[in-house]
Image (tube, rainbow, N blue to C red):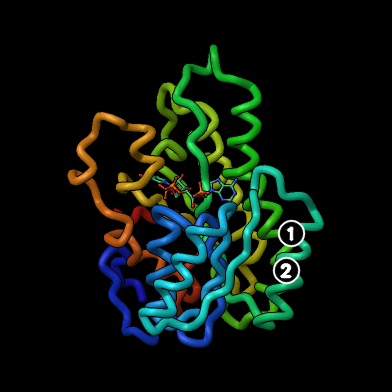
Amino acid sequence: MTDIDPRTYSPEGTHLEGRFVLVTGAGAGIGRAVARAFAAHGARVGLLGRKIEPLESLYDEIVTAGGPRPSIATMDLATANGPAYFELADSIEKEFGRLDGIVHNAGILGVRSPIAHYDVGTWTEVLHVNLTAAFVMTQTLLPLLQASADASIIFTSSGVGRQGRAYWGAYAVSKFGTEGLSQVLADELSATPIRVNCINPGRTRTAMRRAAYPGEDPLSIAAPEDIVAPYLYLMGRDSRGVTGQSFDAQ
Ligand code: NDP
């Protein structure tokens, strides 16, 4: 297990067969590529996002490619309340009877601004979507994950969640919080089969990256499809026992 490099991990196509995993923010960017890769490796995937159209088009792509039929859940993490999370847990239990993993991928950038002028409402929203929603979802779905023999929780970090940088404001703070949440939870679950880790995707060609770096040549950075290897590694059996770590996808 120790000689595997998660960044170049390349498992066989049936690697995730029999598993049901949830990916948040599955409609676009990194979440879409990760959900597609999980399905290509045999997982049934719960596609969670706030808009139905991109989730439906991903559903069609997965089925057309011969992957296991996914499931769609629309949920706006900025506004979802307690009952919405319990409904999600109920529908997973009724439809699949299991949950083997979650990728907390959904996130927003907020604004690039000095702390001195950072808008308080934007601050609250970014912290809520990027951090609090992942906490509430994990808490609500934990009983289902505890029933799995081999569950994996993946949080999404960032370089600015490990070393603060000017003007990254609430986004950076939310990612520091995400690293902290992942470590605390990993420690609490260390005596269980549930593993908890973070992935920092690194510079990746998505709408969020374009918003943060409008002048950058998109072709100079990795496409979402290029960085799925560590997600496949952490969601599959080869990472059993790996917990409390933070990985770089590039
Ligand atoms: P995108 O903006 O391309 O995708 C973000 C996804 O999150 C979209 O599917 C979006 O849905 C969803 N989302 C946003 N807000 C909500 C909400 N309120 N409720 C439900 N879903 C929501 O970003 P990336 O793919 O680039 O980012 C994915 C993750 O990777 C994020 O956590 C980001 O912080 C992290 N990351 C990205 C890097 C990069 O270079 N791209 C670098 C480091 C970290 P919708 O389509 O409806 O907006």
The residue located at (41%, 34%) in the rendering is: 163
Q: Residues within 10 Å of mark 2 (few under 14, many from 20)?
A: some
Number of numbered discs visible in the structure rendering: 2
Residue 119's disc number: none
Query: Which residue sits at x=53%, y=76%?
Result: 70
Foreground of the two, 91 or 132: 91
Question: Which kind of residue does numbered mark 2 sit on?
Answer: Ala
Residue 176: image location, x then y, percent: 52, 39
Expressed as whole percent of the image width and height from the top left, the position of residue 178 reads 56, 46
Q: Secondary structure at mark 1?
A: helix
Q: Classify mark 1 as within 8 Å of ligand 1 or not, answering yes or no.
A: no
Q: Are marks 1 and 2 in contact (CB under 8 Å)?
A: yes
Q: Amino acid at mark 1?
A: Tyr
Some atom of ligand 1 lies within 8 Å of the CB belonging to the residue at label 2: no
Residue 203 lies, with reference to residue 183, above or below; the image says above
Residue 208 in the figure: left or right of residue 133? left
Residue ranking furthest to the right: 83
Q: Residue at x 42, y 36 (%)?
A: 160
Q: Residue at x 56, y 59 (%)?
A: 52
Q: Position of residue 91 (x, y in %)?
A: 72, 73
User: Can residue 33 be seen in the rendering of this structure?
Assistant: yes
Determine which of the numbered discs, if any, sits on residue 89 in the image.
2
Question: Distance between the Cα atoms at labels 1 and 2?
Answer: 6 Å
**Is any atom of residue 182 visible in this view?**
no
Q: Compare residues 72 and 185 and report the one nearer the observer.
A: 72
Quadrant in the rendering for residue 7: bottom left
> Quick one: quadrant of the N terminus?
bottom left
